[in-house]
């Protein structure tokens, strides 16, 4: 039993469904001043819980990507956003997660919340619209085109969130709860 471990900023390709089992890819987009922070909670097979924090998320022109080996851990659906400092029309941190669990099933989760918005603060919608070319300039650390396409698909539609603690249902956990 061990906590998830960081693997790379340069995401692995999922071409021909070859993303390894237990791999989590995170894409982070921040619009605001200074730098933001993101954290996700995991649970080990023995029930122990912990947090992985990603700090130093820069605003707008650089999109952060991280890949982790989950080992025997699962995501709890608990997330934290900190350090959001407004600077304009829309502000906040958006996250997208793409992973393959130990049973070889794929999952994708985007930031969302019940908070009412007066603007379209979703990645990919004006004023945060971008195409593949713009996305590529903001993710130079991702060398493989297929990995970059997966990251693009993962973050588009994610809602910018202010500082706070959030819970998003994880589809595997919902299925397990219904049994």
Image (cartoon, rainbow, N blue to C red):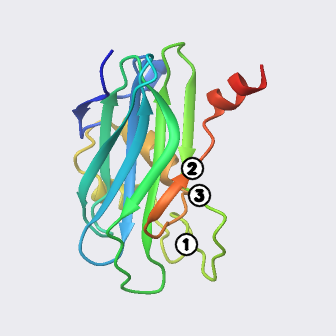
Q: Does dot 1 land on a helix, a strand or a loop? A: loop
The picture places residue 119, in percent across and down from the top left corner, at: 60, 81
Left or right: 105, with 114 as reference point? left
* Between marks 2 and 1 in the image, the one whose residue lies nearer the viewer: 2
Q: Mark 3: few, some, or many residues within 10 Å (few <14, many ≥20)? A: some
Q: Does dot 3 land on a helix, a strand or a loop? A: loop
Q: Does dot 2 land on a helix, a strand or a loop? A: strand
Q: Is residue 55 above or below residue 122?
A: above
The picture places residue 59, in percent across and down from the top left corner, at: 29, 69
* Between marks 1 and 3 in the image, the one whose residue lies nearer the viewer: 3
The picture places residue 26, in percent across and down from the top left corner, at: 39, 43
Left or right: 119, with 53 as reference point? right
Residue 121: numbered disc = 1
* Between marks 3 and 2 in the image, the one whose residue lies nearer the viewer: 2
Q: Are marks 2 and 1 in contact (CB under 8 Å)?
A: no
Residue 167: numbered disc = 2
Dot 2 or dot 1: first in sequence order is 1
Is residue 146 visible to the viewer in this orientation of the structure?
A: no
Dot 1 or dot 3: first in sequence order is 3
Q: Residue at x 63, y 77 (%)?
A: 117
Q: Nearer the viewer, residue 81 or 49?
A: 49
């Amino acid at each position: 039993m061990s906590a998830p471990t960081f693997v790379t900023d340069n995401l692995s390709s999922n071409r021909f469904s070859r993303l390894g089992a237990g791999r989590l890819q995170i894409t982070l987009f921040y619009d605001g001043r200074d730098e933001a922070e993101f954290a996700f909670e995991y649970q080990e097979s023995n029930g122990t819980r912990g947090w992985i924090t990603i700090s130093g998320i820069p605003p707008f022109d650089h999109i952060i990507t991280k890949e982790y080996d989950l080992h025997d851990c699962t995501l709890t659906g608990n997330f934290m956003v900190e350090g959001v400092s407004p600077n304009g029309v829309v502000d906040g941190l958006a996250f997208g997660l793409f992973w393959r669990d130990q049973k070889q099933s794929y999952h994708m989760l985007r930031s969302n919340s019940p908070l009412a918005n007066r603007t379209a603060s979703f990645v990919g919608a004006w004023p945060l619209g971008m195409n593949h070319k713009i996305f590529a300039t903001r993710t130079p650390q991702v060398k493989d085109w297929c990995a970059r396409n997966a990251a693009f698909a993962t973050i588009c539609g994610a809602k910018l969130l202010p500082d706070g603690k959030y819970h998003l249902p994880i589809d595997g956990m919902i299925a397990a709860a219904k049994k």
